[in-house]
Image: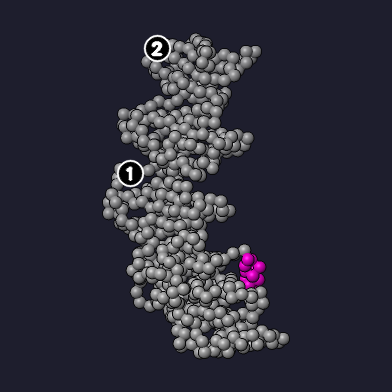
Amino acid sequence: MLPLDDNGTVWRPWDYSPSWTDVGCAVPAPGSCSWLQEHLLCFQENKNSRPRLPTGKDLHAYPWDKSSLKSISLDLQTFEKLDAYASKVSVKSSIEELVRTLLLQARTDLEKVRAVWMWICHHIEYDVVEYHNKSQRSSTPMDVLQTGKSICEGYAGLFEQMCRIAGIQCMKLSGYSKGYGYKTGQTFQGDSDHAWNAVYLDGRWHLLDSTWGSGSVDDSCRNFTFRYNEFYFLTHPALFINNHFPENSNWQLLKPTLTLKEFENNVWHKSNFYTVGMLCAHPDTPIIQTVNGKATISVESRSPALFMYKMKGTKEHGLMTLKKNGMKLEVYPQMTGNHKLEVFAKPHKGSEDLYNCVLEYTLECNSVDKNICFPKDLHQPVGPSWFTERQGFLRPSHPDPIIHTNDGRCSITFTLSKDLSVLASLHSDNSSLTEDVTRRYIMQIHRGTQIEFKIHLPHSGNFVLKIYTKKKADSGNYNYIFNYLISCPNTEVKWPVFPQYYSKWAEDYELLEPLSGLLPANRNVHFKLKLHGIAKVFVQCENTCPLTLSKDGFWEGTFNTSGCTEVFVMVLENANHKFYSHILKYEVETQ
């Protein structure tokens, strides 16, 4: 957000004395008699008039009704030519000449205001030097025009004068704001710190802030970047009040009006909150006190969006889940005290790859829940959602992000809506096993369009199950899609790996027995597999044992592990082939 000026004042209409340069009577250019005559009439008409204060017809209901971001019905596409023209006008000889040039392409009052707005937002940069050196401040409209720089007072003053020259009623307003330097939950006192404008269009007053519409400064307010922000043009008053509190409550343009205390206690919704498509957030207060070491935040959005968060600059110690229209976040600070929590979002369908900060809270943590410990490999958001559905994973057997298991086993199924190759991996902070080994604690089974993941955990604790995909026709790498958190408190759990799969193991094969990759020594072991399109199946160690195809389509047989250290399952894909292919490998317990 842009820095906030601390010398803002309210323009008082009863102190106003119209002049040739601020009512709309610009010095005429040669050949511009009709334009001059028009504005002479404007001057005579407005000479003794003054902008009226807001009345009941100017007011909007509070809180926001979630209908529109603007206080007036707009089709921004109709401004495309005007915006392009106004942003490129380079006149700086006088304010009157600048306005005359802008009005060449503006006919209605709305177009005139838009042209002035667009020019200022693209030509006046925030004066970071003036912001830090109050003694050097000069914010008269002509100074702002000639230098191309100013603080908010200068932006609002220039906007006001350009509008009046164009024949538009305009007010410069001052008050408190939540911008550069604002600390979540702070109180406001003393002089105003910001200035903005109100314009009179179609019989009503409307609010805008050209300072914040022009761009932003860095964290130290040493560098300004032009970054046009449409949000602050004719913003709906119920949204404008989120970070603008005028000295005169009438200029809130709200019914009912907010008190300063209510303004201070409202959560800080940045402009990106609304432009990305957010509607509301809970809690609606800027400071959240944890309960038993936990805080919960939820956001409602107009359409599906992607989210991330940071707490004290990290993404740890939280659990975020996507909802159809929004998200839910549970955070567990690992230290007592105050913590800054930032929530970021971006539209799913937008071309913009960057997440924008949309919310900021302060967490007050009085106690820590030491029982909550998320693995470092846990990626946010967690669990299935609308996003995973769009990636092809439908009808999850476990819709929640956390899977609880007491015996260390679980089975997760999905229906695949796309022709995908799927890969899964298991991760834990408390395991010395390599990733290749932990993959063997996952068995993947395909049955038509259904996919099943059988999980046997090597020990108790919290694990992350990550799922990756790629199109079967692609030869490239797998792409990460989502993950689950699997929790097992039972310290007695110690499952062995599944058998090792070879490349000849086809996707539609299914192993029913034995599931353990470690077979008992000197025991008869029953094998049962479903293998399609296979001529013969054998189990091999010291001896070779053929499996028999049963009437129900399973290859079955019993094999004794005496004298074996390794056992292989082999297949002959065609009766005319001479060579068998290994598809499974088992280890045998040592005696």
Q: Which residue is mark 2?
A: 522
Q: Which mark is residue 372?
A: 1
Residue drawn at point x = 44 percent, y = 34 percent: 397
Front-most of 432 and 237? 237
Q: Which mark is residue 342?
A: none
**In x, y percent, where is residue 117?**
56, 73
Q: Amino acid at mark 2?
A: Asn
**In x, y percent, where is residue 62?**
41, 65
At label 1, counting other C-alpha atoms closer than 10 Å, the crowd grade (few under 14, some 14-19, many 20 or more) is some
**In x, y percent, where is residue 181?**
41, 68
**In x, y percent, where is residue 76?**
59, 64
Residue 455, quarter of the rendered image:
top left
Q: Main structural element of the magenta stretch: helix, strand or loop?
A: helix
At label 2, counting other C-alpha atoms closer than 10 Å, the crowd grade (few under 14, some 14-19, many 20 or more) is some
Q: In the rendered view of the protein, which quadrant contains the C terminus?
A: top left
- In the figure, 583 relative to 136: above or below? above
- In the figure, 268 relative to 372: above or below? below
Front-most of 587 and 97? 97
Is 85 magenta? The answer is yes
Range of the magenta residues? 78-90
Secondary structure beneath label 2: loop
